[in-house]
Image: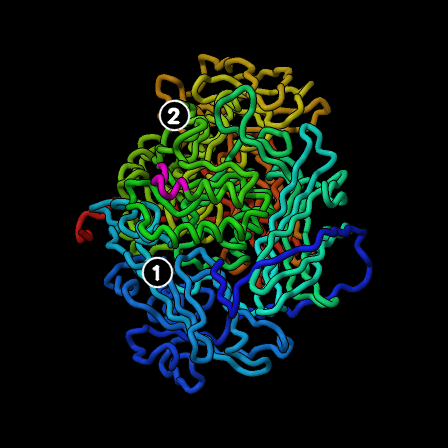
Amino acid sequence: MQIRCGSSLSLALASMIVFAPLSAAAKPTAPEPVIVASGWQLQDAARVPQSGGEVAAATFNPAGWYPATVPGTILTTLVNNKVYAEPLYGDNNRPEKIPESLNRTSYWYRTVVTIPQAYAGKHIWLNFDGINYSASVWVNGAEVGTTRGAFIRGKYDISYNVKPGKKAVIAVLVSPQPHPGVPHEHTLTNGVGLNGGITAIDGPTFLSTIGWDWLPAMRDRDTGIWQKVFLSATGPVLIKNPLVTTDLPLPKTDSTDVAIQATVENITDQPQKGILKGSIDKIAFQQPVELAPHSTQLVSFDPKTTPVLHINQPKLWWPNGYGPQNLYKLHLTFEQQNKPSDTQDVSFGVRKITYSVPDSDNLTISVNGVRVFIRGGNWGLDEAMKRIPRERLEAKIRLHKLANLNLIRNWVGQSTSQDFYDLCDKYGILLWDEFFQPNPSDGPNPTDLDTYIANVRDKIVRFRNHPSIAVWCARNEGFPPKEIDDRLRALMAELEPTRMYQPSSTEGHGVHSAGPYHWRTPREFYVIHNDFFKTETGSMSVPTLESIHGMIPKSDWETITDNWAERDFAKGAQGGDIYPSIIASRYGTIANLADFVRKSQLANYEAFRAMYEGRNAQLFHPATGVITWMSNPAQPSFVWQIYHYDLEPNSSLFAVKKASELIHIQFNEATSELQVINNLPDALVGATAHTFIYNLDGTIAYQHSDKVTAQPDTATTLGPVAFPTTLSPVHFLKLELYDNDGKLLSDNFYWRAQPEHQDDLTALGKLPTVNLEAQVQRKDAAGKALLTVTLHNPSKNLALMSHLQLRRRSGDRVLPVYYSDNYISLVPNETKTITIEADQKALKGEDALIAVDGWNISVAPTSAAGVAIAPNVDAQPDHWPATGLPFQTTGLRQ
């Protein structure tokens, strides 16, 4: 953090430490922070000839300035003022519509605030949580500080510039990164182009916004005040950079040792003394401190000096699926004469992460003594323009929890924010957290090392208390240069006592990336070379028909155009240029867009399930993790996602959810063996596996049962599936796993072709339409609309990939929605129940409508109080003319 005040600091502390139960007496309180989010205005600096002092004067008239969105980027403000149309729709982001000149000028932000009267007699601070790229900050005509780098905070003492109860002018001159570069446009002719470029030389910035194969260039390079701005007030002593660490006496977890440290700083010319007090639940401790003028001191507490910090029976923090995400709050106060000078609240979890096991040389992450097979997703950028309010971010991370994922890789640190870490803590999502260097082939090394390291330092001290962070990684797909690596290792030794430092995302401890990134057959995902901890592998991932309709104009619905290329559907690592031919060869000729989407959901499900099941097959022997490239889209896209930009899941999410069950039954699509996956620390005993094989006409061709004992942290092979020789060319495999009490633990469903034509599934087109029977109930509680849908297949045929989509009765989709399952298949006379949760407000007072589609699915309309079910007619290929969905061949962009 960059702090500017009228002084610096140092400190001396008394020898006595006091600890005691927390008193029930009321705690003294510090003045509340005030968020500065309204009243901001913006203007291109080239249009403002006045100096910073003049712009920050009360007499300045910002006539013609735009109302500004803060937090937000320059482009966000301009879009909100309708200067430009929504960049992430159609061809609105092309350079002739939004100019590259946006990243080659500076901008003034300006607002007027009232300083709270409660701040009287205090040191008053102006705080910035993030500005991209550099800024000079002015208050009431005076420059109070600067920042450089997108990931460093600024904190400025403005006590001598403002008066409590009076208005103050804040003006910020924001400049884009010095090397914005020249982007590659995504086109059908040239594909998605090269990744990155010169932007990497500037280090801590949103270097991906020059354009990558998953994102077109953002014309302002995400320049702006992209994080929170707020006022705060303190006394003469500050509490800085608190650190909480916990240790467990593994294999026991019945107690923890908590260690706490914080720096206290005297920002005045006078000696100061007081008491640093801390509390965790009902535990309290304190230490008297004396500080010389302008001095700092590190104050520490641990069980040796403060026995109450040895805590029995702690509530542990676990990754998703392994246990609850219990969190504690540490409250620190520096108290002088019974009044708080400064306070800090720190959320933390009691957990211990280790990185190796005796039977493997590969990176193996264990939490609280339990091996965690890493099933993760890469995030390239949370949102292309950093429009990521907490509610939207929470939906994304909750969808990862729903998919049974347990890790997000914060690629090149591009998604770093306070909400991101808080929500990963809440939902049990571990973090592989990176600093700010891409693959060496995607841009040069940073040249301003001081700025780079300052941003890294502030990121570490700001977020290191989050239990979700598992690994710090220096660089994507390469080693940092020695001068950076040396300084990073020094930072780790100083600031980060417990976590692993991994220099490269593709070297060391069995860690490798390198894709592939295009669609493959399921059996290909079972091939493991030396990539035992796989940090990148991906596939095409086509969204729903409605999501596609929402991201490109109707004129592009039935022809693959340059607007599809802008949304990543083009030649490149994803293989967009050959994907339609793969789909047609595997599932049959493409009739139109609806048919393409229907067939692509089969492809999504096959690939994303195998992506994780292929690693399950060698669970911890030797595979230890797989992270899909990517799970989160930064823009509306056809590739590398488990949900669309609009937050609607496609079949990829539910394929990952299925494959990532901790107790799981699967068909090994490379060896044709049946496997039970046990990723829990206890053996599975007395279970039963059932295998059913169905012909295309719905008749049962084979059934078999196996008794199962599955050892912990192991893939148990039950032997090859005995496929009859008389099966139809395409047939179906249904698997079920029950525990000793007859409870269903896991089920799975595969469509499969005969080995001699294993990639020809075109016979699926012969499945007759199945008209499902449905029952539905709606119950609203605690602001949530809760729906229960029961689907029954009354026919003699297979119902393949039944898809439910929640809408308002008027027809518009409700988003986001959390489905217990989706894209489900039903054998004859089978019944399944799905639960659905959505925000009640998202229905806007209307009844709910559940639209149903699938491979060969219709549904008998039905209704209940507040909800109805009906077929999704638009998703049916025969609802639309046959076009063949060709590629555009004339009038292409060059």
Specify the farthest residue to the bottom: 59
What residue do we see at 57% from left, 32% from top? 354
Residue 220 falls in image quadrant? bottom left
Residue 85 in sight in this render: yes
310 sits to left or right of 639:
right
Estimate the x, y position of residue 26 in percent, counting from the top left. Answer: 79, 64
What span is in magenta? 479-486
Number of other residues with Cα within 10 Å of mark 1, as a class: few under 14, some 14 to 19, many 20 or more: many
Residue 827, x across and y down, in percent: 55, 29
How crowded is the residue under tag 2: few (<14 C-alpha within 10 Å), some, or many (20+)? Answer: some
Q: Position of residue 321 (x, y in %)?
A: 61, 36
- The residue at which mark 2 appears reads as 524
Amino acid, disc 1: Pro
User: Residue visible at 48% across and 76% down?
Assistant: 39
Q: Amino acid at mark 2?
A: Glu
Q: Is residue 599 magenta?
A: no
**Which residue is under mark 1?**
87
Q: Is residue 94 above or below residue 657?
A: below
Helix, strand or loop for disc 1: loop
Say left or right for 216 vs 672. left
Q: Earlier in the sequence, mark 2 or mark 1?
A: 1
Image height check: is 844 above or below 306? below
Residue 480: x %, y % from top left? 36, 40
Q: Main secondary structure of the magenta part?
A: helix
In front here: 561 or 360? 360
Numbered label attached to residue 709: none
Whole-angstrom CA distance, mark 2 to mark 1, is 37 Å
| Residue 802 shows in this picture | no
